[in-house]
Amino acid sequence: QEIGRSVQEAATGTQEVSANIVAVNTGAQETGAAATQVRAASGEVAGQTESLNRVIADFLKNVRAA
């Protein structure tokens, strides 16, 4: 009877560990996807920053020339 209960507790614990591993794996995948989106967005922002810097530089050049 004691062995049966111990086996059942071990099986339950194993199922809980397995469920936790699945949850961690899912979280890791979601984090990876979010990181990819952040990287893409930061690339877009960098490109827009470069464009804005060029526009501002041209504007200031025209103001100085006026």
Image (tube, rainbow, N blue to C red):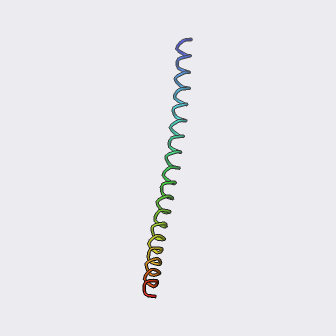
The location of residue 3, given as percent across then percent down, is: 52, 14
Query: Quarter of the image containing the N terminus?
Result: top right
Q: Is residue 17 above or below residue 5?
A: below
The location of residue 19, given as percent across then percent down, is: 55, 35
The location of residue 60, given as percent across then percent down, is: 45, 80
Q: Which residue is depicted at the point 46% across and 75% down?
A: 51
Q: Is residue 47 left or right of residue 15?
A: left
The location of residue 24, given as percent across then percent down, is: 51, 41
Q: Is residue 21 or residue 8 the one in the foreground?
A: 21
- Figure label count: 0
Q: Which residue is depicted at the point 50% across and 37% down?
A: 21
Which residue is the extreme one toward the bottom?
66
Q: Is residue 33 or residue 52 the one in the foreground?
A: 52
Quarter assignment of residue 5: top right
Q: Is residue 11 or residue 42 the one in the foreground?
A: 42
Q: Which residue is depicted at the point 46% across and 76% down?
A: 56
Q: Is residue 50 above or below residue 21?
A: below
Q: Which residue is depicted at the point 45% across and 85% down?
A: 62
